[in-house]
Image (tube, rainbow, N blue to C red):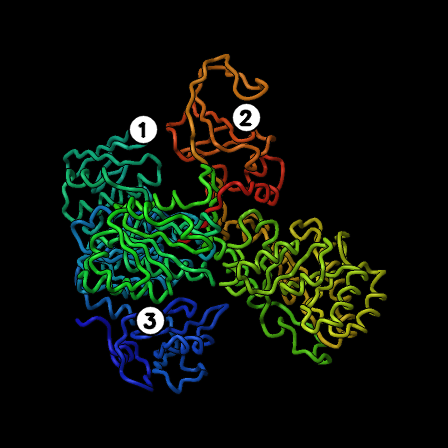
Amino acid sequence: MEHGYLLSEVAHAIGGTLTLAGTDERITHLAIDSRKPLPAEGTLFIALRGVHHDGHAYIASLREQGVRNVLAHADAAFDAHDLNVIRVPDTLVAMQRLCAWHRLHFHYPVIGITGSNGKTVVKEWLYQLLRTEERIVRSPGSWNSQVGVPLSVWEMGAEHSLGIFEAGISIPGEMERLAPIIAPTIGIFTNIGPAHGEHFTSDRQKAQEKAMLFAPSEAVVYCRDHAAVHDALKGSGTPERVLRDWSRHRTAFVRITQEVRDASSTYITTEIEGAPHDFRIPFSDDASVEDALHSIVALLHLGHASAWINERLAHLQPVAMRLRMMAGAGDSTLLDDSYSNDLASLGIALDHLVRLGGKRKRIVVTSDIVESAERPDALYPRMAALLKGAQVDHVYAVGTAITAHASAFGEHARFFASTEELLAHVPIDAIANAAVLVKGARSFGLERVVERWQERTHGTELRIDLDALRHNLNHYRAMLTHPPFSRSGAGRLRQSAPATARGEVKVMAMVKAFGYGSGAVELARLFENERVHYLGVAYADEGVELRQQGVRTPIMVMNPEPVPLEVLHRFQLEPEVYDLRSLRAAIAFARHTPDMPPVHLKLDTGMHRLGFAQEEIPALLEALRDLGALRIGSIFSHLAASEDPQHDTFTRGQVELFNNLATRMDEVLGYRPLRHIANSGGASRFPEARMDMVRLGIGLHGIGVDANETARLQPVATLRTVIAQEKRIPAGDSVSYGRGFVAAHDMRIAVLPIGYADGLSRRLGHGVGKVWINGQAAPFVGTICMDMCMVDITNIACAEEDEAIVFGPSHPVQEFARDLGTIPYEALTSISPRVRRVYTHG
């Protein structure tokens, strides 16, 4: 089959209506995001409609990039005079149908993986174990959604011999749509757990939905000890002969008879068809052992001997689950993806580079693409085209294969025989003020480039999961989609009807206080890419930094610190005014500054912090009659206790008072500024408080108004460090300053490179608080020092350089805050700037 399909073939396959303005072009690339670099030739842009975005709105910008092929909704109106357009009732359904049709062209084995956890790890480990035997196409990253699955399967080609794809669902009915796209010949069901549980009545129902993936499979691998998974497979009518189960407790295809673990490995004896087989898994944590066992059973089904499997298990590497972003030397930013290299994941990484880079120069450090099924003379020109499409300024490439095709990459590429040669010949100041992607095959050791070029080497780091942040933003956006009310009186005003009357509630994302400790610039870039309406900062300096870093989203400054209005004007920052003095100063400045940004009126409705009090309203109304050129961007207030049910009457009184006062101001102004009063908790608990805009803060970081909402959010921050040294302490010896802790028995302690200068408060220590090492709690012993602390590891199998988690997804920051006797806000914002921030993408 020739690569790609003619537009006419695509239209026929999906039942669409094709209108050609040009030639019947051959489609080789599918695109859904106009913000990404796209090749003009061979691209079909699929205009998806979502809750918050409509792809049809960006067709004009795609035309400027040279893209001329569009898959659109039948009812969408846009300028199509020079476009090839396929119209369908639903573009998502059409894309899924197209990729399911594409899947039918290939008859080699396909492994489909689903479950609540471990999908990506199992997929990547199977790739590691089989890559020397097979030519594999697989899901890039964690592309397992209704959009990610078809885009992954689209990459299948005649040059491959095995496909490995993962599938995830969040609501009933989704797997039924994904199953024909993957059509797995071999299935793996990893487990069932609480993830995405809010739309299912039980784990049983969720397991039944996921089991739909395996209807056509000739074999299904799973753990027999997961009762919900086993029942779902049996209930789905999966024949007994295709089940490839493993169990610690029951008769199964692979029965585990013995399991021994040390600090770094797990030794397993199994019984397979009555014969014993031993395996050594180079990991000791529960999740890794389970993921490895799924992989082992799949390999056994494929006919590989246990000796062959053991040989390859010995080289199994941890999966770099995330694309890591960190500060680099010379005010650069590094994107670390230094453990893998293939065209699909390169495309994803380049998308992140483009978003991150802004107007800064873009640098890519890369290597040979090893074990690719594609011919080098086709592979490397495609790679070069991706780099060109992302407008990369400089390429540093390592390896003989890529060097042999240097002519494809242009004059801005330099080639090196080894990573050592690159480090010796590329000075560190070459990356100053740049966005740098480091992406290469593991064998080239490009992590050494990251180590050399990163700004800090402190062993402690705060990892920020940007995908979790995006998930949480979308949680609130979904909540805001259909506001429950609209207000009357708008017809008397010159401005159009309020946002709520149009079914839209705007979002202000708070990035003050260094983005709640997570890094304001990086969070602001994400929120800008997600098209939030406003960013909120406390001080003008925070807003100035964002502007200097290229952030263009409107920014509201919410702190009363005196700052020259000229500075606010120069950086287009919109200040809060909260008394007559600040309002009159803004009015006076606007008289000789026509493009003065709008200001925002703060009303005090009961918080009694900042804002016009009720007795000041008459004077405020008089002042509003003579604003001159000054515009009021919004009227807002602050809820004092929106999270606490015992104060709900007070909160509702605040909302009512605010609306009454704001209406009086509307009448004086003659137009209707935005209204906002709700924070994260107010947005969740009081629909009437959502008004025209909500200000989201702690909720974006995964902390909901109650346990139910928190379960639907995703934790964003992980504070981690490593064991610097292990010590044995005899009974009677003391630990740390002041000899406040004396060992009652012989014990082992671990010294960790994190202390109160990093944000680990001295309120901890002496048994108060803990870290988590290899899944076990290690209590603090002795006093927390400035740069170090000690924990008890007497009963924990661990070694130096093992990871220690202070808080993270499995050990929430809320628990850490309770140990401190404080709230998550303080716990997060107390993490010192000297702790390296690392930003991860799926």
- The answer to whether residue 737 is above or below residue 684 is above
**Three-letter amino acid code of the residue under disc 2:** Gly
Q: Secondary structure at mark 3?
A: loop
Left or right of 73, for residue 618? right
In the rendered image, is residue 634 in sight?
Answer: yes
Give the residue pinned by disc 1: 262
Q: Secondary structure at mark 2?
A: loop
| Circle nearer the N terminus (2, 3) | 3
Callout 1: few (<14), some (14-19), or many (20+) C-alpha neighbours within 10 Å?
some
User: Could you tell me residue 299's position as x and y percent?
Assistant: 19, 46
**Three-letter amino acid code of the residue under disc 1:** Asp
User: Could you tell me residue 487's position as x and y percent?
Assistant: 69, 72
Q: Nearer the viewer, residue 211 or 804?
A: 804
Q: Which mark is residue 314?
A: none
Residue at 54 percent of width and 23 percent of height: 782
User: Could you tell me residue 589's position as x and y percent?
Assistant: 75, 67
| Circle nearer the N terminus (3, 1) | 3
Whether the residues at callouts 2 and 1 have beta carbons within 8 Å, the answer is no
Callout 2: few (<14), some (14-19), or many (20+) C-alpha neighbours within 10 Å?
some
Quadrant hosting residue 175: bottom left
Q: Which mark is residue 767?
A: 2
How far is the residue under mark 3 from the one under mark 1? 51 Å
Give the residue pinned by disc 3: 39
